Amino acid sequence: MSNKGSSSRRSPFSAAAARLSGAASSGSTGGGGGAGADAGSDGFLSGTGASYAEQMLIAWRRDPSSVHASWAAYFANLEAGMPPSLCFVPPPSLQHSAAAGGGAAGEAAGAGASGAVGIGGLKALGVPSASSVSVSSPPGAGGGGATGGAIGGAAGGGTDLGESAGTAAEGSGLLALYEDAPQSVHDTSRLIQMVRGYQTRGHELASIDPLCLPRKPPYCSVRAAQQPLHLAPEHYGFTAADLEKVFVTRVPGMQGFLSPASPPRRLRDLLKRLQETYCSSLGVEYMHISDSNACNFLRQRLETDQAYAFSRESRRKILARLARAQLFENFCATKFSTTRRFGLDGCETLIVGMKAITKRAVASGLESVVIGMAHRGRLNVLVNVLHKPMQQILSEFQGVSGYGGSEWGNTGDVKYHLGVEFDLFDRDLQRNIHMCVLPNPSHLEAVDPLVLGLTRAQQYFRRDSERSLVLPIIVHGDASLAGQGVVYETLQMSSLPGYCVGGAIHLVVNNQIGFTTNPVDAGSGKYCTDIAKAVEAPILHVNADDPEAVSFACELALEFRQKFKHDVFVDIVGYRRFGHNELDMPKFTQPLTYTLIARKKTALELYSNKLIQQ
């Protein structure tokens, strides 16, 4: 562009721009004093700051309401011919604090009396004052949807939290408290680091072990041994006095506690929600995932304003499913006490989780579920998830394998190796879903590639190019998951175009022991599920004594798989009440652990007592 004649033309803001460029130098020479002198000596109009100020001036010239009230007051005073060092007018909160201390407030008032435009007088210029700005809370905040709360300055008097009534009033009170004591950049940085600390390592403090075994070998691997973990607020520089302060944690592009729409919270309340989310009976590992959308999805589901809670009717169903699972094991243990059945005792909530998945699968429009698992818990799954007739199971205990026809699998193999395939009718939703449990020998994880192969075949014949109609579920044991190479061989092929099935849900029956092998000798990682990090799959560790947490984790796993078509792991941490099979004596090899287990209440008893107390 030609510059011809530019010396004879003046831009519409050249005079003000000249004064802007001289503001820093005039302020540094000591002119003005008080609040105005402090503003001038800041040097915010020098260097790159001058360019920013000119852009703000252009915007103010076009529309005075398009800039902040403090900028509008500054430009109005500058245009009126005041010295730059006296043009700055502090916000109401600073005026209030200055008035309490005297001195500078008097000089600011004098400047206002001599013709300076204050923030309170900007209404005549069409600029909204700071006290009229409203902030909306995110949907669902406090259980009341989107609510607006006025941010009142100190002079205007914000709503006091102690006098608030209801969710909206409480939100307005927190906003007022935050406005009265705005946080520094250093505070924001510390808050973000603390939240990230819980997201990254909060699972290490989660109460996921129903036996509460010490975090040291032989009860865990060497790497999982308890190390000093600094997640306390003191580690990030906060003190006890900061617990009642109100902070805002808003980061662009994030969800959950760091969402741009997250409401102001007291530090105490934020810590409580962080501990409920990441350090309760559910521990989550997902920060190893490189897909930011997947991470934000999990944050959005986990980092809610209130902890997840099931309705009264849902709790009744969870209790009924847990009762059926345990009563089946109790009956078999009593009736067939000298027969091996590889029961699910100590991890009965697997049935609760699988029922949650299948019920949600029907509601999600899935047409088929393919299940592969080892022998532990297979009989319970066949009876309570796939509803194989009880008389068929009991006949197999008595050595009759031909009962009921070929529909129920007459292979002549032992009962805990057999499979089932049939259509299950869901009475609630009035539709069928195809269910299949593949037969599996005693090679534990050998069935994994077969599950994915059958899933791929069904997707092909159903023309399921989106991989959303057929769901593979693989049930692992903790020792076999960490120790058998076929697991990694299957996982590393999960995203290959010729083998992809859109991800599988991996349920781990974690007995914290492999046959007679202690965790210290079973694997080198912190968890038996560390192999999942090789394919960036999220891992949900959950306490088997909390059936509600198991149900929530399994439903979340299905939702994640359906949305991202990727593998997801649910590590159900329980115990093995009896030996490797019911005829073993586990106290010979793990005497201390099985002394604890002998005194341990069952999950059904614990959950029943919890519901009675509620």
Image (cartoon, grey):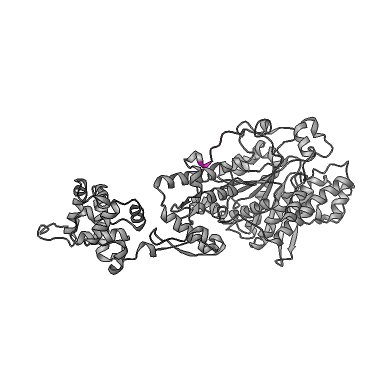
Taking the image as shown, residue 544 lies to the left or right of residue 107, namely right
- Of residues 449 and 206, which is closer to you in this image? 206
> Which residue lies at the image location 60% right of the left edge and 51% below the top edge?
503
Residue 558 on image: x %, y %: 63, 54
Q: Quadrant of the N terminus?
A: bottom left
Taking the image as shown, residue 454 lies to the left or right of residue 44, namely right
The main secondary structure of the magenta stretch is loop
Q: How many numbered callouts?
A: 0
Taking the image as shown, residue 22 lies to the left or right of residue 220, namely left
Q: Which residues are magenta?
A: 228-233
- Determine if residue 419 is in view: no
Residue 78 on image: x %, y %: 21, 59
Magenta stretch encompasses residue 556: no
Residue 531 on image: x %, y %: 60, 40
- Of residues 500 and 570, which is closer to you in this image? 570
> Which residue lies at the image location 24% right of the left edge and 58% below the top edge?
110
> Which residue lies at the image location 23% right of the left edge and 60% below the top edge?
77
Residue 320 occupies which quadrant of the picture?
Answer: bottom right
Residue 134 on image: x %, y %: 42, 64
- Of residues 120 and 382, which is closer to you in this image? 120
